[in-house]
Image: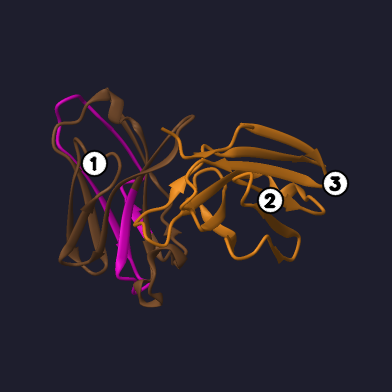
Amino acid sequence: DQQVKQNSPSLSVQEGRISILNCDYTNSMFDYFLWYKKYPAEGPTFLISISSIKDKNEDGRFTVFLNKSAKHLSLHIVPSQPGDSAVYFCAASAETGNQFYFGTGTSLTVIP
Amino acid sequence: DADVTQTPRNRITKTGKRIMLECSQTKGHDRMYWYRQDPGLGLRLIYYSFDVKDINKGEISDGYSVSRQAQAKFSLSLESAIPNQTALYFCATSDGAAGSFSYNEQFFGPGTRLTVL
């Protein structure tokens, strides 16, 4: 059973606008969340993370928001750039656990 | 040079054949992982190793085995490949020095695309 879900397989956004990628999880024990970015023919690379003690973490154009009560997190990219076109995976883990659980990915296309 | 390398990058094989996928890393990390990626299913953990003497099953270990030959090397074997093992396989590493597992970012290799006919 998928514990981390990304319900939008794809998203298209105009350059300069905001991209919002969503992720939902079911396990209330998850307390650490990451976003990875993946280009074709490459492995995923770490983008940004957030701990459950925070509800927001920002790194340049990337901001992750966490809503623990809704078991929902989102990644905002502002402004979006063509180089942001990639597949984005969210992942979650519990401090008491021993693995990350990944979502199915959202393919973002930023149109110039 | 890449920090995490995987060989081969692509492999086509037949049902019943034994296949080994290799992973090497120069990051000096203790922890290594094997994942597979399937369309619509994301990345799923096959096996992980927190040091040379430690091997653990992930959520989908059936049909696979691993060997941690050294801190820097972690191999994944399919003893008798079957078509539903056709997938993209990723090796990853993380630093175990920071303590809790969940707070260690993972670094991925470029992947091996395996096709089993």
Which chain: brown? B
Q: Tell which subunit mark 3 falls on.
A: A
Left/right of residue A15 with respect to residue B115 in the rendered view:
right
Chain rendered orange: A
Which of the two marks, 1 or 3, is nearer to us in this view? 1
Residue designated by label 3: A17
User: Where, quadrant-wise, is the C terminus of chain A in this rendering?
Assistant: top right
Out of A82 and A13, give the one closest to the viewer.
A13
Name the disc covering residue A98, or none. none
Residue B8: percent from the left, percent from the top?
Answer: 31, 46
Residue A110 is situated, as x and y percent measured from the top left of the image, at 76, 42
The quadrant where residue B23 appears: bottom left
Q: How many marks?
A: 3
- Seen from the viewer's position, the closer of residues B17 and B44 is B44
Q: Do the residues at discs 2 and 3 belong to one chain?
A: yes
> Mark 3: which amino acid?
Arg
* Residues rendered magenta in the picture: B5-34
